Amino acid sequence: MNHSFITFGLTAALLIGSQARAQEAAPTAPTPAPAPTDDGPAISKMPELERFVEAEYPARAAAARIEAIVILEIDINAAGGVDAVRVIEPAAATGYGFDEAATLAASKFEFSPAEAGGTPIPVTISYKYGFKLKDAPPPAEPAPHVPVLSFSGLLLERGTRAPLAGATVTVFQGEGESAHGLETTSDNEGRFSFFDLTPGEWKVLCDPEGYFPVRTAETVAAGEVVEVVYHVEKRSYSPFDVMVEARRPKKEVTRRTVTTEEIEKIPGTFGDPIAVVTNLPSVAHTPFGSGALIVRGSSPADTIINVDGTNVPYLYHFGGIRTAIPAGMLQYLDFYPGNFSPYFGRATGGVLDVKLKRLQPEKANGYIDASFLDTGVFFSMPLGDKAAIAIGGRRSYLDVLMQQVIPKDGPVTLTAAPRYYDYQLMASWRPTPDQELSLIVFGSDDRFAIVFNNPADAAGIAIPEIKTASRFYRGILSHRLQLAGKTTNELKLTLGWDEQIADFGPGRYIHQDYFSPQLRDTASFAVADALQLKVGLDWLLYNATWDVSFRRPPMEGDSIADNNSFDTGGISKTKIDRKVVSFPAAFVEAEWTPIPEVTLLPGVRVDYFDWIHETVYDPRLTARWRLSATTVLKGGAGVFHQAPQADQVDQGFGNPDVRAFWAYHYSLGAEHQPLSFLNVDVTAFYKDVRDVVVLSDALIERGGVQVPERYNNNGRGRVYGMDLLVRHEFANGFFGWLAYTLSRSERRDNRSNGFRRFDYDQTHILTALGSYRLPHNWEVGGRWRYVSGNPYTPVVGSKLDLDADTYQPVTGKVNSARLPAFHQLDLRIDKRFVYDAWMLSAYMDIQNVYNQRHTEGWSYNYDYSQKSGGGDLSFLTIFGLRAEF
Amino acid sequence: MKRAHPPAFAALAVGVALATQGCGSTFDPYNQLEGFRLLAVRAEPPTVAPGATATIDALVYEPDGPGTTYAWSWCPVRTGADGAYECAMSEADFKAELEAVGVPVDSLTFDLGTNETATFAYPLDPTILALICATAMGPPGAGAAGLLHCDQGFPVSVGLTVRYGDKEISGFKTLRLALDAAAPANANPVLTDLSVAEAKGTRADAAVLPAGEPTYTMVLGEKYELFAEVPEAAAETFFGTTTTGIAPTEQREVLFITWFVDGGSTAHQRTTFFEGTAGFDRLVHNTWTLPQPEELGRDRARLVLVLRDNRGGVAWLRRDVLVGRP
C-alpha cells in the first residue's frame, strides 16, 4: 500500500500518530482559588484534599490510547464537602466522556475546609483533573509505531464486478487551506486501506480514468474499522473500448479478423457471428436464412468452416437461422477468402476459422441472452489459479411461436415444429506457465417435422410428411506447449459425430451418420533468426453409414426445373454401413524474413483422399513487403485441392471415377494505414478452377453394362476481380468499415457451350457499416448494402406433365438473366443498464428499414406464364435482452 | 455506492415485431378454369400389351364451345427443361439405330394423327424393349437415376399439342409398354358419380349430380360439400417399383383427384388417397364455395374431376350445376 501526504493546493498538514504511554490517572494539586471578594474575610488556610476519588477512564478513549486533562471548578462547603463541580476547560478529545468522568469523580472528593482566621469557610477552587494511561511506556523509550487500520475498501467495476486495480483513492478533511488528507492505490484485487485516521468524518474521492468519479464521506471512529465496497461505474461499456489481445501480425495475403466485441454490435446480424462474415469483401450476398457462404465465386461446399482448426459440418441451425456456437464462446473469426496457409486444406474456396475463447476468467461470470428466436446462457468461473471451466447452452422457441401462427385447420400440421438447441463445455488447465491443456465439447441438434393435411394439395404429389433432423457434436482435447524462443507445439484430438436425417415420405429419405475423429499436431520452431518453420499433421477419418434414397442433390447451374425435391423421377438409392474413409494430410510452411521488410511464406501441403484413392500436392507461396511503416505490398499464388462430395463418388448416386478438383489462386494487393485508426486494404484476385465436378447426361460402360455417367470432371471455372476494405478501428466513438467487391465469376460445364455466369456472380457487392457510441451507454449502428442481382436461368415456356398433373417449365440458357439488384438498410440500437453486480443490455435490430422489396427468386403461376419476385424478408424488427453478471 | 438509474425497461421483454409486405402476387389456382385448358390425357388401357393398341383421348376445357385441334405423337425419350421436353431423338435417328441392330422399322412412325382421339400400337418386339431395359438399368442395386424404370413396362412418352384460336398448350404423358403379355396390367381408375350437399352436410344428405343437362341448383356465394364416388378397388394393389420406393414391393396405388371449377374456390385443389396416411374419405371429399353473385354472369357452373393413379391410370367426370341468386 502506498501512503503519501497530499496537499489540496494549501499547506500540507502532518498527522502525527498517537503514542502509547503508561496510564496514570492522578489528580493534580488543587490550584488556588480565586481570592475572596473584597467584602469577605481573608483565607488563612487553603482546603486540602483528604479523599481522592479516581475517575473511571472512558473505555473508548482508553482503547484509542487517548489521554486528556479537564479543568474543573469545585465549590467546597465549610465542612469540606463538595457542593458543586463545573467544567471550565473541557478535554481536548471531545466526545469520549472525560468531562463527565472528571466531574463525577470530583463531586465525591472530601477536603479539609478552608479557614479564615481559624474559622472554616466555604471556598471555590479550580482543579485540573488529568487522565493518563497507566501502562504508557516511559516517554524516553517509544515503542515502534504499529499503524492501526481505520478504513478499508474494495473497488469493483459496476456491472461486471471486475476488481479495479491501480485506482487512486483519496481521503481528506477540512476545506480550503485547512484541507489535509491521504491517498492510496488499489491493489490487484481492487482493495485499498487507510491507517491511523483520526476519528471523525473523512471525505472520500476515487476518480479512475475512464470511470465516473466516486465522491462520498465516511465516519471514522476511534477503535473501529470502516469497511466499504465501492461499485465504480465505467463511463462506457462499449465493447469496442477493449482490445482483447494485441493484433496478430498478418502473414496471409488476405485475412479478415472480426472480434466478438465487434460482432455483437453489427446491425442486421442479430449478434450472430457467422452472419458478420457476409459483410466482408469477397463474400456474396445470400438470401436471409440460407446459411450459404459464397466466397469469390466458389460454391458453398468449397469453403470450409473450422472451429479452432477442427472441421465441423455446419455452424448454422436450420441452415442459417442462428449460429450453433454462441458469441460468448468466441474470441474472434479469421476469414481467408483465398491464398490461405497450408495449415488449411481440402478446400478450393475460402476458410472460416472460428477461434474460441481462451478461458481465463478472474471471477465467475456469465450471461443470459434472450431474443424472439431463442434463449441462451453462458457461465464461466476460475478453478483456482490454473484452471477454469465454462458451460453454455441455447434453446429455441420457434416451435412455440409457429404453433401459434399456423391455423389448426390449415394445410399443414407441425408435429415437431422447428426447434434447435446447442450446448457447450469448455475447460482449461495450465499446470505450468508454458503449457495448457483444454477440453472443448460442443454440439447442436435441429429437428423439424411437418405433416401435410392434404399431401396432394400441398406438394403436387403425395408427400404426406417431411421430417428433418441434424445433429453433431465435437469434443476437442488440445495441448499447447510453449517452449523457449519461438518453439511451440499444439496437439488437438477431436472426436466428433454427425447425423443427418431427412424423410420426404416413403422412398425419399436420407439417413447418414458419421463418426469423425480428427488428429492435428502443429509444431513451430525457429531454424534461424530469419527463418521459422511450421510443420503439421492433419488426419481426418470418417466412419460413415449412409442409407439414402433420393434424387441427386442440387448443383450449381441448376434451374428451377432441376430443384424440385418432390420430383417424381430420378430417385437413386445407396446404402453403406460403417465405411471408413481416411483423409491424412501433412504440411510444412516456412516464414522467411530475408530482410526486415520482406516476409516470404512458402509452403506445401500433401493430402490423400481415401475415397478416390488420390494423393494431391498443393504448393503455396505468399509474400509481404513492407514499403514503409504504413504501407505493405502483398501477393500470393498457390494450388488448392478438394475431394468430390460423397454422393458424387458413390456408385449408386454418382460416378466412382470422379477425381479431385483443384484451383490456382493468385492475388496481389496492398495495405495502407493513413491514420492510426484507419486501414485500407485492396486486393486483386484471380482464381482458375480445374476439373470441376459437373453433371453429365452421358451413358458410359462400366462392368459390361451401360450406366449413366452422372458426373465427370469436365467443368472449369474462373473468377477474377478486386476487393477493397476501408476499416475505421474504434476511435472517437466510432467503429465501422466499407467493403466493396468487383468481380466476375464464370463456369463451364457439360450443359453450356463456353463460360457462363456462376450462380452467385455478383458484379458489385458494397457494404457500409458503422457503430457510434453515445453517452450513457447508448450505441447506434447502421449497415447499408448494395449487391448486383444473382444470375438465374429464365423460364421461356412450359409444358404440361400429364402424369404429375403439373406444368413443367421450359428453361432458357443457364444463368442468362439477372435478378434485380439488392439494397437494404439495417439499424441497431443498444442500451446498457448498469447495476452494482450485473448489467442488462437491450437491443433493437431493424432489418430493411426502408422496406425495400427484394427479389431473391421468382415465383410462377401454375403454367409459368406469370411471375412475381420474392424470397426475402421485407421488414423485420427484433428485440433482445442480455443480462450479464 | 448508488447512482440514479434511468427508467427501467419495465415492459421490454423478449419479443418480435414482424411485418412483411405480402409474399408476392397471388396467382389463380391451378384448378381455376378461366380459359382454354388441357386437363388430362387418358390411355385405354394405360398399359399396352405386346401386339395390342391403346386408345388415347384428351379432356379439354373449352369455355367458348368446341373448336380444339389436336396433334398427337409419341417419342421413346424426351429431353429435359432446357430442351423444351422435345423428343431426344428424331424419328429418322431412332429408326436408323434400330435398323443398325436388325430391327424392322417399316411401319414405325412417331406421328399419331390429328383426331380427337389417337390410337397407339405397340411399336416393337417386346424382347427388344426388354433388352434395352436390361442394359440401361445398370447392375442390380446401382440405382438408375436418369435411366429407364421398366418394372411397370417400357416407358414411352405420348405428346399432345392442342390449339384453340391463338392459344396452344403442349403436354406429355407416359405410356407403359408391357414386356410380358401375361403380367398383370394396370387399369384406369373408376370415377362414377359426384354428389353434392349443403354446407356441413354429409354424404347421406348429398344429391347425385346428373350427367348431361343440370338439374341441381346451387346458390351463389354459398358453400357446398362435394362427394366423389370412387370404389376402393380403384386403388389397385400391385408389385413393383414406383416413385415411392426403389425396392419392388407390394403396395396400393396412390390416387389423387384434381377438382377443377370454373368459378368460386375449393377447399383443396387436389385430394389424395395414400394408404396409411390419407384415407379414401380424404380423397373423395371437398368443399366448393361458389362465386359471389357479382362475379358470375352465367346461370350455370361447371365441375371437372380428374382422378389419377400413380401408374398412369386416369378417369374423369364433368358435371354442370344451375346457379341461383341468393
Image: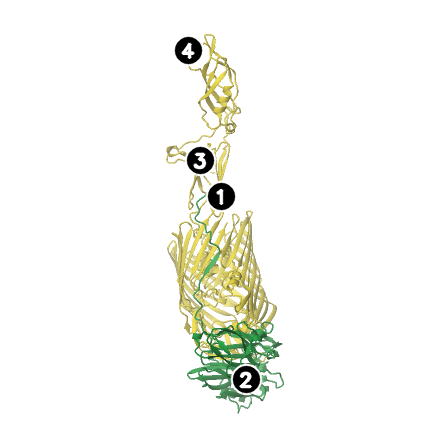
Q: Which mark is residue A466?
A: none
Asked if both marks, 4 and 1, belong to the same chain, the answer given is yes
User: Is the C-beta separation of discs 1 and 2 under 8 Å?
Assistant: no
Q: Which mark is residue B43?
A: 2
Give the alpha-carbon distance from disc 4 to disc 1, as whole Å.
Answer: 76 Å
- Chain bearing tag 1 is A
Asked if both marks, 4 and 2, belong to the same chain, the answer given is no
**Type of residue at label 2?**
Ala
Query: For the view shown, which residue lies furthest in the bottom direction?
Result: B106
Residue at numbered disc 3:
A202
Colour used to depict chain A in the structure image: yellow
* Disc 2 secondary structure class: strand
- Against A163, is B243 above or below? below
Viewer-proximal residue among A14 and A666: A14
User: Is the C-beta separation of discs 4 and 3 under 8 Å?
Assistant: no
Residue at numbered disc 1:
A188
Colour used to depict chain B in the structure image: green
Viewer-proximal residue among A794 and A590: A794
**Type of residue at label 4?**
Gly
Q: Position of residue A639 (x, y in %)?
A: 48, 67
Q: Residues within 10 Å of mark 4 (few under 14, many from 20)?
A: few
Query: For the view shown, which residue lies furthest in the front direction?
Result: B326
- Sequence order check, earlier mark of 4 and 3: 4
Mark 3 vs mark 2: in front: 2
